[in-house]
Image (cartoon, helix red, strand yellow):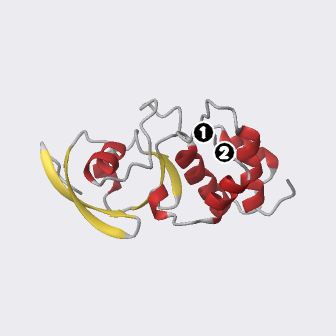
Amino acid sequence: MIQIRDISTIELDINGEKRKVTVRAADTLLHTLREQLGLTGAKAGCENGDCGACTVLVDGWPIKSCLMLAVEAVGHSVTTIEGLKNAPTQKAFFENWGFQCGYCTSGFIMNCHALATIHPGADDDTIADWLQSNICRCTSYEEIANAVKQVLKKDI
């Protein structure tokens, strides 16, 4: 168990690379990724877990990084949008116009990438259920669903 007092140096596994950071006990993973590591793909939106713009993968599962403390990520593998490097989900979002302003896009891509990995045979109900965890103010949900279906190799 890690003992955190005031300020501590911890090691995080970010995109397959061990990174040392100095954090306060209250620092969120989102803040640490953006402010200390310069990984700005995860966005600060609502900062209360509603919008999903800050979604990253922790051990392959989508997590809203605004709700997770940086110290909670110790011993876990964290993947950000910067760590995907041309994943099929990114290509599908591009090909299906699954974005407009782009602010929510990285969160949606991370969530959809996890969906395709965890539920490769997902049906329409499962896709709709997973898409509810992220918000797009520009209303491109149909295009996002089409991108997911393309990754899952379903008919669009």
Q: Residue 86 lies in what quarter of the image? A: bottom right
Can residue 118 be seen at all in this image of the molecule? no
Which of the image's four quarters has the N terminus? bottom left
Q: Amino acid at mark 1?
A: Ser
User: Residue placed at 33% from the left, 47% from the top?
Assistant: 34
Q: Measure the alpha-carbon separation of dots 2 and 1.
A: 6 Å
Left or right of 97 on screen, residue 71: left
Outermost left residue: 6
Residue at position x 42%, y 45% in the image: 65
Residue 108 x %, y %: 59, 46
Rendering coords of residue 84 (x, y %): 51, 64
Give the image quarter of residue 27: top left
- Disc 2 and disc 1 in contact, CB within 8 angstroms: yes
Q: Which residue is mark 2?
A: 130
Q: Residue at x 49, y 56 (%)?
A: 81
Q: Nearer the viewer, residue 74 or 20?
A: 20
Q: Amino acid at mark 2?
A: Trp
Give the residue drawn at x 72%, y 53%: 147
Residue tagged by mark 1? Answer: 133
The dot on residue 93 is: none
